[in-house]
């Protein structure tokens, strides 16, 4: 795999009932090892997991910072609370989705709601 395996991915909220045109003020920026097709590379994640960070920005709320984690069974999630009190936010089929600008992905928030996001930007780290 190429040296530039780590990418910073920005997701903005896509259209929802609450935000009919989406929202650039609600979303995530995270670092993940992506392969040449834009899929998360689990083997590279194991080597770079300490660098696979996430920042959740949500309107006027304080940003949450955490890690991209690989769960048993192969799913991916964002984990914010080191003590384990908060629920993880699970990426819906993140293992199957390509992270390419213009593509849509969904994240299940801590309340269990599935929220759509659009990949708006990817940059090399």
Image (spheres, grey):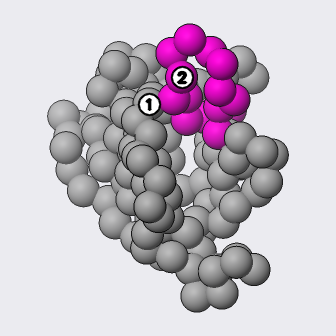
Q: Quadrant of the C terminus?
A: top left
Where residue 122 sits: x, y (%)?
32, 59
Q: Nearer the viewer, residue 108 or 110?
A: 110
Which residue does the image show at 34% across and 19% down from the upper left? 50
Which residues make up the magenta segment? 75-89
Sequence-first disc among 2 and 1? 1
Which residue does the image show at 47% across and 64% down from the upper left? 59
Q: Nearer the viewer, residue 52 or 112?
A: 112
Local SS, label 1: strand
Residue 21 seen in the figure: yes
Q: Please, is residue 24 above or below residue 30 in the view? A: below
Where residue 65 sits: x, y (%)?
40, 35
Q: Quadrant of the N terminus?
A: top left
Q: Is residue 97 magenta?
A: no
Where residue 84 sits: x, y (%)?
62, 15
Which residue does the image show at 28% across and 38% down from the upper left? 5
Which mark, residue 66? Answer: 1
Residue marked by disc 2: 81
């Amino acid at each position: 795999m190429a040296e530039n395996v780590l990418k910073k991915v920005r997701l903005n909220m896509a259209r929802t009932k609450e935000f009919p045109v989406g929202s650039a003020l609600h979303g995530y920026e995270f670092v993940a090892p992506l392969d040449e097709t834009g899929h998360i590379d689990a083997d590279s994640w194991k080597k770079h997991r300490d660098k696979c960070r996430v920042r959740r920005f949500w309107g006027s709320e304080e940003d949450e910072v955490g890690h991209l984690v690989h769960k048993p069974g192969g799913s991916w999630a964002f984990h914010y609370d080191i003590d384990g009190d908060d629920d993880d936010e699970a990426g819906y089929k993140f293992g199957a989705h390509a992270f390419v600008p213009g593509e849509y992905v969904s994240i299940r928030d801590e309340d269990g709601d599935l929220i759509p996001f659009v990949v708006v930007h990817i940059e090399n780290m």
